[in-house]
Amino acid sequence: MGFFLKSVQLGSARQRGEGLRLGTVRFLPRGVMKKSYARLNYFDIWLPTLAPSKELIRKARSSRMSTKTFFRRYRTEMKRTEQLQLIQLLARLATKTPVSIGCYCPDERVCHRSVLYQLIRGARPGFR
């Protein structure tokens, strides 16, 4: 069974096989009209439910929170029912059609989308 999941930086040029681009960000892009999100390569669907909470973002920005701590707290947020259900849905969907999860961060290594990618991969059918 194939698995078609990619991680992308929102606003970057779309790549072949990227499929449906999801904006897993808390805030919409500034100065961009709603009808232009997809055309300007931000996202096809905004999915803030899978973004870090406003509180976690605020704490991370206002303190010297380590990436490790940020990732741990984000993982905890993703254990809530609504988030888990979406993660499971995306894991199933990615076995049938290409899906891309995205954020504005240029460096995926320090971005929540790297954790989200792992969570979705771990939730795919038949994995455990």
Image (cartoon, helix red, strand yellow):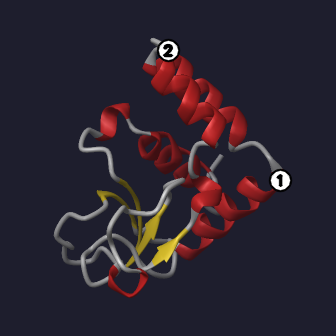
| Residue 92 placement (x, y as % from top left) | 61, 71
Residue that numbered label 1 is attached to? 81
Residue at x 75% of width, y 62% of height: 85
Which residue type does callout 2 highlight? Ser
Which residue type does callout 1 highlight? Thr
Dot 2 or dot 1, earlier in sequence: 2
Q: Are marks 2 and 1 in contact (CB under 8 Å)?
A: no
| Residue 40 placement (x, y as % from top left) | 24, 77
Residue at x 64% of width, y 42% of height: 53
Where residue 83 sits, quadrant-wise, is: bottom right
Q: Is residue 12 above or below residue 114?
A: below
127 to the left or right of 12? right
123 to the left or right of 5? right
Residue at x 70% of width, y 39% of height: 77
Per the model, the C-alpha gap separating discs 2 and 1 is: 28 Å
Q: In this view, does 91 lie above or below 38?
A: above
Residue that numbered label 2 is attached to? 63
Is residue 126 in sight in this rendering?
Answer: no
Q: Which residue is more in the foreground, 87 or 49?
A: 49
Give the structural element (helix, strand or loop) at label 2.
Answer: loop
| Residue 33 placement (x, y as % from top left) | 37, 79
Number of the label disc, if any, that sits on residue 90: none
Is residue 38 in sight in this rendering?
Answer: yes
Q: Is residue 30 above or below residue 39?
A: above
| Residue 74 placement (x, y as % from top left) | 61, 35
